Image (tube, rainbow, N blue to C red):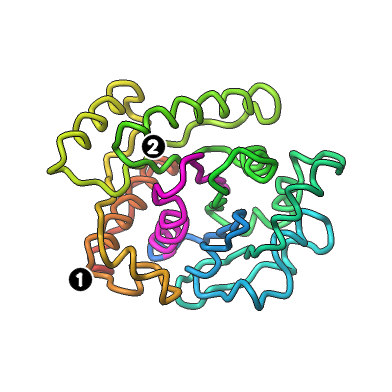
Amino acid sequence: MTHIFAITNQKGGVGKTTTAINLPASLVAMKRKVLVVDLDPQGNATMGSGINKNEVERSVYDVITHQCHCAEAVQHTPEAGYDLLPANSDLTAAEVELMSLKMKEHRLQYALAEIKHEYDYIFIDCPPALNMLTVNALAAAEQVLIPMQCEYYALEGLAALMDTIGHIQKVVNPRLEIGGLLRTMYDPRNSLTNDVSDQLKAHFGDAVYSSVIPRNVRLAEAPSYGLPALQYDKSSKGAMAYLAMAGEMVRRVEGIKAPDTAHITG
């Protein structure tokens, strides 16, 4: 069974793309077959996966505008270990083009239907805005994974995002569920961080993942080398945090004990 997650937050700078790279890489280390779909015109997930966005011949733009099949655009990332449907600035044009196309909300869903059986997990990295690309991601996904910082303005943004997801559930994708909230750039020494974290757990309960992603220099450096943190520095706190998150996701989504990852970090 394939589990499809849209990784989204309408607020930028919350670790969305960092999660879209490092969580899949950690699941690959647990012997899962994973596809990452870069749906952000900035192409950061593409570059951070070691693929030059300016050199790709086929991208997610070609897929959702029906210029090629999904399998023709997917690339394997040797270092990260997952497959990637890359993006570049061409995708900006798709936001306008989609508005005039039939079934515009479901273009990505139909494209992924051709290949999704090949994967255990598919992660869609959404742009930090509610536009037709994000709507396509939410229409294709079964669950929404929300990375967020534990700060005051994050709670405001989260309320707006929940309204958006509720609307998508009613109008576009009734199967869509909240797959969980992931606390990123987490600093337990900060009293505001702890206060917001407590509020999240009080309001969302088990939807909040126990795993937290700390502020970590290695996590910030890794994308410039086109690597997930696990390949850049497997002993770093960031790499270990995403391994823990992947293990928790496997237990939650698959209902089984996650494989032992001690050999990966040790």
The label on residue 266 is 1
**Chain part drawn in magenta:** 1-28
Q: Which image quarter holds the C terminus?
A: bottom left
Residue at position x 38%, y 40% from top? Answer: 252
Q: Height in image: 21 above or below 98? A: below
Residue at position x 35%, y 73% from top? Answer: 231
Q: Would you say the residues marked 2 and 1 are in contact, meaning their CB atoms lie under 8 Å apart?
A: no
Decide which of 202, 160 is in the foreground and name it. Answer: 160
Question: Pointer 2: what residue?
Answer: 181
Left or right, residue 203 beside residue 57: left
- On whether residue 121 falls in the magenta region, the answer is no
First in residue order: circle 2 vs circle 1: 2
Q: Please, what is the three-letter code of the amino acid marked with disc 2?
A: Leu
Q: Height in image: 49 above or below 22? A: below
Q: In front: mark 2 or mark 1?
A: 2
Residue at position x 40%, y 43% from top? Answer: 147
Left or right, residue 179 beside residue 51: left
- On whether residue 26 falls in the magenta region, the answer is yes
Q: Please, what is the three-letter code of the amino acid marked with disc 1?
A: Gly
Percent x, y of residue 220: 33, 64
